[in-house]
Image (cartoon, rainbow, N blue to C red):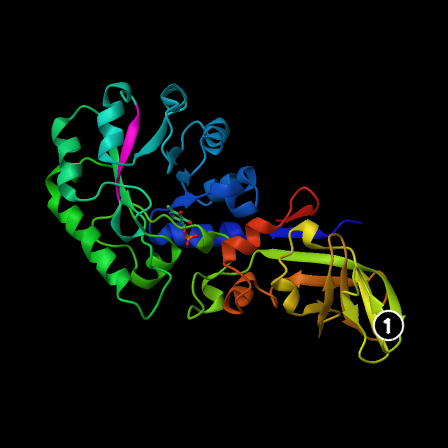
């Protein structure tokens, strides 16, 4: 039996409802909704009252529109398939003054969100004067204004405060134009959890907060209930004598007589090598991983472990955000690595 990725949709729905009750959410559903599956995430968030969705891919934006005639869809990356945007009523970022100058005559009928570059410096207008030019000309339909903070997840640095102040300054400068703009948004999960909804904002724009991992470890676990369980099975156990090895190129060599549990999951299923530096849970007991292969995992087990026993890689006890804190990789990195083509997905309602 393949390894199983279980997604707790019930918890996901409760969390989305709680977050959306306190601040209107534009849910970030990029990368197949952080690899939980776009249709599942959309349905769950929609039932929880969320009406606005953001992604970086035009394909996902169109898929959202096909799922939902009425929701707001915001494309965070610029594209030039303007007809597709119009046909599907997809709002798009307006990423820079040069983009605007080049395409302004072709953008009719498309809702655009002016993007402020700020300290992320990935994309966006450089200052309020540039943005004011667009608003003043009145050629295109501006339905939103937004930025993305580069340092909201970092504590102990001054940059988050700087970028927040710069952004609030831009909003202040443009306030005369913003009265009828329905989407004013900047905050990812960390920014929202740190500051609540910033003044003058219509929406928050969280991702990870809706997908079961804390954006920073200082938050209590109950603020973001885990939604993922990843489990495999022990295929068989083997005994190794001291000095014997197992796996390709002697991936593991026994320093004493020992038992290994061979499990049916590997890096081909999206398990990060950095995750394999840490334990698994079998029958409520932690065991270290001895070697990670493409489709197999060797766990240094004991006599209590038998074929057929379940091996947990992620669960309520082994949260994705625990491993983020241990340096395994960002929450979203661990989640998006999981291979939904090879894993069986189960949905817990
Ligand atoms: C532009 C933008 N907004 C919001 C988010 C959501 O961030 P988080 O998952 O930290 O809430 C992301 C995620 O990378 C993003 O790229």
Residue segment shown in magenta: 110-116
Q: Residue furthest bottom?
A: 256
Is residue 9 in view?
Answer: no
Q: Where is residue 174 in the image (x, y as percent from the top left)?
A: 13, 42
Q: Residue 242 location in percent, x, y?
A: 86, 78
Q: Is residue 253 left or right of residue 34?
A: right
Image coordinates for residue 130, horizontal then vertical, percent: 16, 38
- Left or right, residue 8 beside residue 295: left
Which of these two is toward me, 151 or 285?
A: 151
Q: On the image, which quarter does residue 154 sit in? A: bottom left
Foreground residue among 210 and 122: 122
What main secondary structure does the magenta stretch of the protein show?
Answer: strand
| Residue 32 showing in the rendered view | yes
Q: What crowding class fits label 1: few (fewer than 14 Cα within 10 Å), some (14-19), or many (20 or more)?
A: some
Residue, disc 1: 244
Residue 230 % position (x, y) = 66, 56
């Amino acid at each position: 039996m393949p390894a199983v990725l279980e997604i707790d949709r019930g918890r996901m729905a409760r969390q989305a409802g709680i977050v959306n009750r306190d601040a209107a959410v534009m849910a970030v559903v990029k990368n197949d909704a952080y690899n939980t599956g776009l249709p599942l995430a959309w349905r769950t968030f929609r039932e929880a009252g969320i009406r606005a969705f953001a992604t970086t891919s035009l394909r996902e934006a169109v898929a959202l529109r096909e799922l939902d005639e009425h929701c707001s869809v915001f494309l965070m990356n610029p594209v030039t398939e303007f007809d597709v945007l119009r046909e599907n009523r997809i709002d798009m970022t307006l990423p820079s003054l040069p983009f605007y100058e080049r395409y302004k005559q072709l953008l009719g009928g498309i809702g655009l969100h002016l993007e402020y570059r700020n300290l992320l410096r990935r994309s966006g207008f450089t200052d309020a004067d540039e943005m004011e030019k667009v608003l003043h000309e009145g050629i295109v339909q501006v339905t939103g204004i937004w930025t993305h903070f580069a340092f909201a997840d970092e504590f102990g640095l001054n940059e988050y405060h700087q970028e927040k102040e710069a952004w609030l300054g831009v909003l202040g400068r443009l306030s005369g134009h913003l009265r009828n703009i329905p989407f004013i948004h900047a905050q990812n999960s960390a920014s929202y959890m740190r500051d609540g909804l910033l003044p003058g904002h219509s929406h928050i724009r969280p991702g990870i907060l809706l997908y079961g991992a804390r954006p920073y470890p200082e938050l209590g676990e109950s603020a973001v209930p885990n939604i993922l369980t990843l489990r495999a099975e022990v295929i068989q156990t083997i005994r190794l004598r001291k000095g014997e090895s197992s796996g390709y190129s002697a991936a593991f060599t026994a320093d004493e007589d020992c038992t290994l549990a061979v499990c049916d999951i590997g890096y081909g299923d999206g398990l990060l090598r950095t995750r394999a530096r840490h334990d698994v849970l079998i029958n409520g007991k932690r065991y270290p991983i001895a070697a990670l292969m493409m489709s197999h995992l060797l766990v240094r087990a004991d006599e209590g472990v038998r074929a057929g026993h379940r091996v947990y890689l992620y669960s309520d006890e082994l949260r994705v955000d625990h491993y983020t804190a241990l340096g395994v990789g960002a929450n979203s990195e661990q989640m998006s690595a999981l291979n939904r083509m090879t894993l069986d997905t189960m949905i817990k309602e």
